[in-house]
Amino acid sequence: MANLTLVQAINLALIQEMEKDDRVLLLGEDIGLNGGVFRATEGLFQQFGGNRVVDSPLAESGIIGTAVGLAMGGLRPIPEIQFEGFMGPAFDQLTNQAARFNSRTRGGITCPLTLRVPVGGGIHAPELHSDSPESIYTHTPGLKIVMPSSPYDAKGMLISAIRDPNPVIFFEPKRIYRAFREEVPEDEYLVPLGKARVVCEGDELTMVSWGASVIQCMNAIETSGKNIELIDLRTINPIDMDTIAASVQKTGRCVIVHEAPKTCGLGAEIATGIMEHCFLNLEAPVQRVCGFDTIMPYYKLELDYLPDAERIGKAINETLAY
Amino acid sequence: MPVNTVFETKIESVSILDEHGVFDSELGNGLIPNDDLVAMYKHMMTCRHFDEIAFKLQRSGRMGTYPENRGQEVPSLGASYVLNDGDWLTTSYRENAGLFWRGLPMEKILLHWMGDERGNHIDEVRCTPLAIAIGSQMLHAVGLGWSEKYKNTGNIACTFFGDGATSEGDFHEAANFAANLDLPVVFVCQNNGWAISTPTTIECSAPTVAQRGLAYGMHCVQVDGNDIFAMVKVMKEAVKNARENNRPTFIEALTYRLGDHTTADDARRYRDADELELWGKRDPMLRLRKYLEENNLWSQQQEDEHRSFAEKKIAQVVKNAEGIDAPPASDFFDSMFTELPKQLKIQRDTMRTSSLGQNPSQVPTHTPEGAL
């Protein structure tokens, strides 16, 4: 066991998968000698060399498009896009190419690539460094979407993602890259994709979140003193409705928390899923605590935009009082 | 401070058998064995007939939109003639001749345009399905060539696209990756003068499209894309450069589509009749046939015999393709992921019987009074 931050756990997962499988190679901007802007690939260039840790030209569509080709050629590429705000240029290669090859060839060509992207706000970063676009890609059939919130899950889920034969977007919540440490086994282990984690059990209210917001939820729950069940979704697509439904059938109340804008955010999909699975169990309307339907503000006001323990606490009280 | 010239260049344009039938024996002798030339001419006849029949299938309502390939047979055929079986080819949709030469069953192309994804399931040859999003396939070739270099197989990748595609960002990113990372890739631009109705002058105001590759530091050459000899010559050099040196080449093949962009297009709205007539005389099949006949390699009798063969073959291909029934509707679920997630299984299994995803235990067992 080692006491690691989330970014260290990612680094360890990359090292172990590269040691185990020659087909795994990394490509992206500044990931080589520099170790990535968040140091997620620190030391890998020195350990594995420039053929496997490749500093690419500064071109996001190129990074994803060539990763599609590498994957079709039998390798396991792990492209990195430096910040989620720079995924735009790669949108076509991600959504029209990587996501579709398996389907459009009816199983003839798969694209086993794992795209790593730091995501979300809260680190006082410049413009276009703080967004939460996960529902855009969840609305793209054919992509698996992952966002861990703990070092343990980050390592186990990254290994699962790399070994998954489908294209996976592995969102890394940058606000908690180094926010806390956790015991992480040095031995290999897998955390399966598509399975949510019950962070703490409770029977008064269900709370569903993912990424850095999970930490805000934990703070809010502690402050509230209520008996709340917190579910960390971990995998956003495919979504684990079974775990959510089982919890809401027990509690009858649910609050969903995410950083992304409210309208057409994943909270809407989860709320509908709760209607489908738990309608007769509900004691209160499902509440959402989200980012707003605005542009993510620059950092002076970013904490006003992001869901925090106070806003979440208000939703807890309203939902319990209904 | 003096002003120095730090870079000068030139673009060579290669022609061996020109539109008047003049043959440059110095460049062309021994380049392609006679038997292969005859085989390629026969193949072009078959492909041309395939194209005519595909057009008629669309016009008679038996197939969806189809892009005619007529007039552009040479570039992809010449490329495929030079490529090895282990090499990759990523194409757009006017490369039927090259794909068929490599061994892609013709039925697959018909299936694609008949609205059936199974036409894209290709195990027979190393190619990707026709790329519909313009220019998207070039980066895939770069990645595929990269994967072959990584595995040290000696295989390379070749990608085809049109003149319009060189305006796309993906072209520039692909060229930049291939050149800077030393990847074994051959870029072939079929410059047919038009991106649907947009003339090449709006896509590229430089004297040649070929010189676009120069900016990325790769070798560039222009070639008469209706001349099979010239195409094979430049392709051999490009493939050698890729295979031996891991260096990309950009080939601009000058050609012309004698048909419309697709069956949904009417090129008379934007192209002059004179231009079409001019290029009709440059039809790659006319000049190759003339060359073969002058060298006693082809006769009217052979022409008639092969036409009859092609008609029978394509009739059978059409029969085969039309004989393939639509798959069950579950087909569009089953390949979404290598293993179908539970939510998709529910949607698939209840697509006709339930509102999507409704949990049966949550459906009311009684009908409220007054409800229908």
Image (spheres, rainbow, N blue to C red):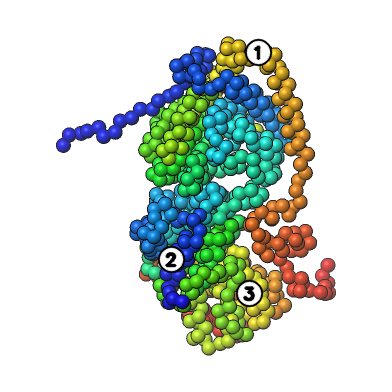
Choose the circle earlier in sequence order: 2 or 3. 2
Res A208 visible = no
Q: For mark 2, what is the residue?
A: A11
Q: Chain of mark 2?
A: A
Look at 63% across and 80% down and name the residue there. Answer: A253
Res B323 visible = yes
| Three-letter amino acid code of the residue under disc 3 | Ile
| Three-letter amino acid code of the residue under disc 1 | Ser
Taking B91 as reference, is B299 above or below it? above
Q: Residue B270 location in percent, x, y? A: 55, 28
Look at 74% across and 52% down and name the residue there. Answer: B329
Query: Are discs 1 and 3 less than 8 Å apart at CB?
Result: no
- Find numbered disc 3 in the image and state the secondary structure of the residue it sits on: helix
Q: Is residue B153 left or right of residue A102?
A: left
Q: Do circles 2 and 3 both sit on a common chain?
A: yes
Q: For mark 1, what is the residue?
A: B299
Name the mark on residue A244: 3
Look at 42% across and 52% down and name the residue there. Answer: A51
Name the mark on residue B9: none
> Disc 1 and disc 3: Cα gap in Å?
76 Å
